Structures are given as C-alpha cells and as structure tokens.
Amino acid sequence: MKQCRPFWAFLLALSLIISLALTLSGCTKSEIPDSSGVSDSSDSSGSGPSGYQLSAQSFTVETEHLSYGDQDAVPDQDLATGEIQYLQLEEEGRKNFGALDEALKTQKEKLMDYSTDRVAEFGQSALELEDYKREDFYPYSSNVFAEIRRADGQVLSYLLEWNEYCGGVHPTSYYEGFNLDVKTGAAISLDQVVSDIPALKTLVIEKLLAEYGEDTFYADPDTLLSDYFAWDEEAETYRPSWTLGEESLTIWFSPYEIAPYAAGLLHAEIRFDEAPEIFTGNYF
C-alpha cells in the first residue's frame, strides 16, 4: 500500500475528532466485470438459495479538524475521509451460518481499525504539508469497496478494493479476492479448487495476451508471472488474488502489478467447462 507519511506522524496530532456515520457514499468505483448470476451492486441485499441474506454496507469516517503546533486547519474542513463497505449476514443467516458470521465480523473489525488509522495518518499529512491551503485541495481518502462475486450455499466469494488518495494525479488501488466456505467460515485455498496450478498459470497467460495484447505489460507475461503462482510461505497461501464464480474462476491483477496504471484492473477468467481437467470439482 502507498504510504503518504510515516505512521508516527499521526502520534504528533494534538487533537483528533473522528465522526462515524452510517451512510452510503457517492464515490465512483472501478469497473469490474459482472459475475454470472450475481448482482454487481454491492450496496444491495440479496437472498442466497440456502435462505441467508448478505448485505454490503458502508460507513464514513471524517477527520473534521486536526491541529499541530502553530498550524491550524480551517474549522470543520475535511482533511481526509474514509469509507468502508463490509459484508454481513442478516438475522436468518446469522442463525444458520454462525462460523461465516464470525469470519465476516472479524474482517469488519479489522477494516474499521485500518481505516481509522489511515484517515488519521492522511489528515495529519495534509496538515503538515499544508496541502489543505491550496485552492484545488481535495481531501485525502482511504476507502474499501466490496464487490460480491458469488453467494450461495457453498461459497461466499467477493473482491475488496483498497482505494487511497493522498495527493497526486490519481488514487492508488489494490484488489484482493476473498473466498469463504459458507458452512465453516474458513478461507478456501486455491489448490482446493485447482488441481494443476502450473496449467492454470498457462491458461491465465493465454487469456491475458488474448484480452489485452502483449504491449500492455511491463514484460512478457510468462516472465512476469514466473513465480506468481508459487506458494507464499509467509502468508501461507498462493499468491494470486482470485474469486470464484458459479461457472468460472477469475484471477485479478491490481494496477502496477504487471502493467502500468493506465491499464487498470486486469483479469483472466477461466470457465470450469473450458478446462475441466485442471479443477478439483470442489465448490462447483
């Protein structure tokens, strides 16, 4: 993630007022291809076939006023804002899928803590750098958006976008896929779905070249992805960010990951019936 200022700068703040409001923001999200059978509106509620409901909600964290030394922001001026969209089960779902409910609650708490820290840090940076005094100043922001890709009796799969702005020409975005077993609440590992990881890598490269052209990437995709599908010992997971649909698996690449920012969010979708030999058959 992009660091605008060291986190210790936050500790220098003499006062910080943060207000939380349960409200939906008008921020524009990046375009993400629709998932088969799943609504692309992450702030709407929907019922899964097993009788539970999922809803993506958001709250806004606003830094109303910060002071540091002899500097003082304009009263009530927003220096930095934040929004988090998180998933939660409705009442019936909480009764029937307790493990999944706990997993979603844990992630919600982590996202709230993260956003609060980042907004405070960004607000302090805007104050110290005196960016807020510019006529064209736009509040720094740290947002997390949720996009549901699949929600049924087996799998809850969704894509989170971390979108941050702290000056400059454009914000920075990072995407991460989450795939949870509905019954256990546990994360689904890529090798539980794919039996042949090297073959998956080959298909992904073919898809990327066919969809975007070789000139899109920093280098040859085969070289860029040489160790991309390897096991990450530290994170104890495979490195690709991926989501699971009803009929396909999608690998996601954030801006700057394998191509310039202008290329945007890149993806490679592999249908189950396209290469059945590389899939385990689990979670179909």
Image (cartoon, rainbow, N blue to C red):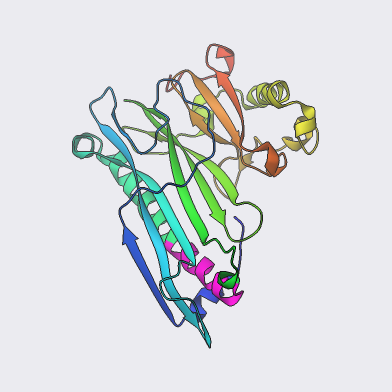
Residue 128 within the magenta-colored segment of the rendering: yes
Asked if one can make out residue 204 in the rendered structure from this viewpoint, the answer is: yes
Residue 93 within the magenta-colored segment of the rendering: no
Task: Please tell me whether residue 119 is drawn above or below residue 258 in the rendered image.
Answer: below
Horizontal and vertical percent for residue 255?
65, 42
The quadrant where residue 38 appears: top left
Asked if one can make out residue 7 in the rendered structure from this viewpoint, the answer is: no
Name the residue rendered at 49%, 63% in the picture: 118
Answer with left or right where residue 111 lies relative to residue 182.
right
Horizontal and vertical percent for residue 182?
33, 32
- Tell which of 218 and 198 is nearer to you: 218
The quadrant where residue 203 appears: top right
**The residue stretch that appears in magenta:** 116-130
Task: Please tell me whether residue 115 is drawn above or below residue 172 in the rendered image.
Answer: below
Q: Count numbered badges in the picture.
A: 0
Horizontal and vertical percent for residue 264?
64, 38
Q: Residue furthest front?
A: 135
* Image quarter (top left, top right, bottom left or bottom right) of the C terminus: top left
Task: Please tell me whether residue 45 is drawn above or below residue 7 in the rendered image.
Answer: above
* Image quarter (top left, top right, bottom left or bottom right) of the N terminus: bottom right
Name the residue rendered at 68%, 23% in the picture: 211
Task: Please tell me whether residue 99 is drawn above or below residue 138 in the rendered image.
Answer: above
Name the residue rendered at 45%, 70% in the picture: 77
Answer with left or right where residue 48 lies relative to residue 82.
left
Name the residue rendered at 55%, 74% in the picture: 127
Look at the magenta stretch and give its main secondary structure. Answer: helix
Horizontal and vertical percent for residue 232?
61, 44
